[in-house]
């Protein structure tokens, strides 16, 4: 009787092991197919299919949270900013210092008009990255929220960074053509806007003139210096 019982237990154990190995193999095959589907869709720029593949992978590998990053990026590329912001928030719960996701989340919230939340994300991103261009995003949000004193302080901090003196950015000339202008000229123009926001028109015009002195074709300081009624 004891040998019979042992034989039954061994048979049950073997059956369970075979079932588990079979399930694992099937899951691995499904994961491989979903990844192949994702890679092919990205190669052919079909983000809708890529998004579906990412959802498949999230179901198949629920503990792999890196798929959230891909999903946030896809939603952002589709201009589905609400979804991109929500997925970014979920991803950041698991990896709060993910710079790519912070940027996606901040830009998405900006597009949605949630400037306070966007500013917080950009501030955190700047703390992690020390990136001058991220600091400029912080300044823009502070200006839009009428945090003029904070914005002006940050423009001075930005002007003190070495990268500013050697960097150009794209802007528009008076005809609407895209041109390269010194990053410093863009910051000086922003300082003019901040000064105007504070009611200091005399200082504002000085900033606009300084911006034009190093970027004569830069349209924004020209327009800001002589605003249309």
Image: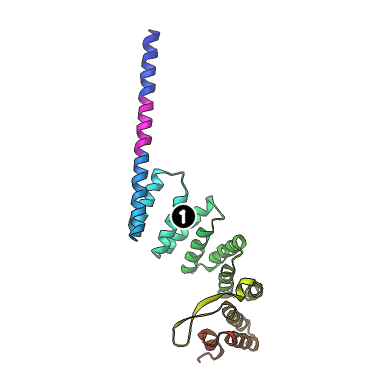
Magenta residues (range):
15-26
Q: Give x and y (percent) for residue 211.
A: 59, 84
Which residue shows up at 54% across the image and 91% down it? 226
Q: Which residue shows up at 50% across the image and 56% down it?
A: 89
* Closer to the camera in the image, 8 or 115: 8
Specify whether 154 is left or right of 102: right
176 sits left or right of 95 in the view:
left
Residue 207 to residue 34: above or below: below
Residue that lies at the very extreme toward the top in this rendered image: 1
Dominant SS in magenta: helix
Location of residue 221 by image quarter: bottom right
| Residue 23 covered by magenta stretch | yes
Looking at the image, which is closer to me, 34 or 229?
A: 34
Say whether residue 197 is magenta. no
Q: How many marks?
A: 1
Name the image colouring.
rainbow
* Residue 170 percent across, percent down from the top left: 50, 77
Q: Position of residue 86 (x, y in %)?
A: 46, 57
Residue 216, placed above or below residue 157: below
On screen, 195 above or below 23? below
Q: Quadrant of the N terminus?
A: top left
Which residue in the protein does label 1 denote? 69
Secondary structure found at label 1? helix
Q: Which residue is most to the front?
A: 166
Q: Quadrant of residue 61?
A: top left
Classify 10 Å Cα crowding around label 1: few (below 14), some (14-19), many (20 and above). many
Between residue 227 and residue 14, name the one nearer to us.
14
Q: Is residue 153 above or below residue 98?
A: below
């Amino acid at each position: 009787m004891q040998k019979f019982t042992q034989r039954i237990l061994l048979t049950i154990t073997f059956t369970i092991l075979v079932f588990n190995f079979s399930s694992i193999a099937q899951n691995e095959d499904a994961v491989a197919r979903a990844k192949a589907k994702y890679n092919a869709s990205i190669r052919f720029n079909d983000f809708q299919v890529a998004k579906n593949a990412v959802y498949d992978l999230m179901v198949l590998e629920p503990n792999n949270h890196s798929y959230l990053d891909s999903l946030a990026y896809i939603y952002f590329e589709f201009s589905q900013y609400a979804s991109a912001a929500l997925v970014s928030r979920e991803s950041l719960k698991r990896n709060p210092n993910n710079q790519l996701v912070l940027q996606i989340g901040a830009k998405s919230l900006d597009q949605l008009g949630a400037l306070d939340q966007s500013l917080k994300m950009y501030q955190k991103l700047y703390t992690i990255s020390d990136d001058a261009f991220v600091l400029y995003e912080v300044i823009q949000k502070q200006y839009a929220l009428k945090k003029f004193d904070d914005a002006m302080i940050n423009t001075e901090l930005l002007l003190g960074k070495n990268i500013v003196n050697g960097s150009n950015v794209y802007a528009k000339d008076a005809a609407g053509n895209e041109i390269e202008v010194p990053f410093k000229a863009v910051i000086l123009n922003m300082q003019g806007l901040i000064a105007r926001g504070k009611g200091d028109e005399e200082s504002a015009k000085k900033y606009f003139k300084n911006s034009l002195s190093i970027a004569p074709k830069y349209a924004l300081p020209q327009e800001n210096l002589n605003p249309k009624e």
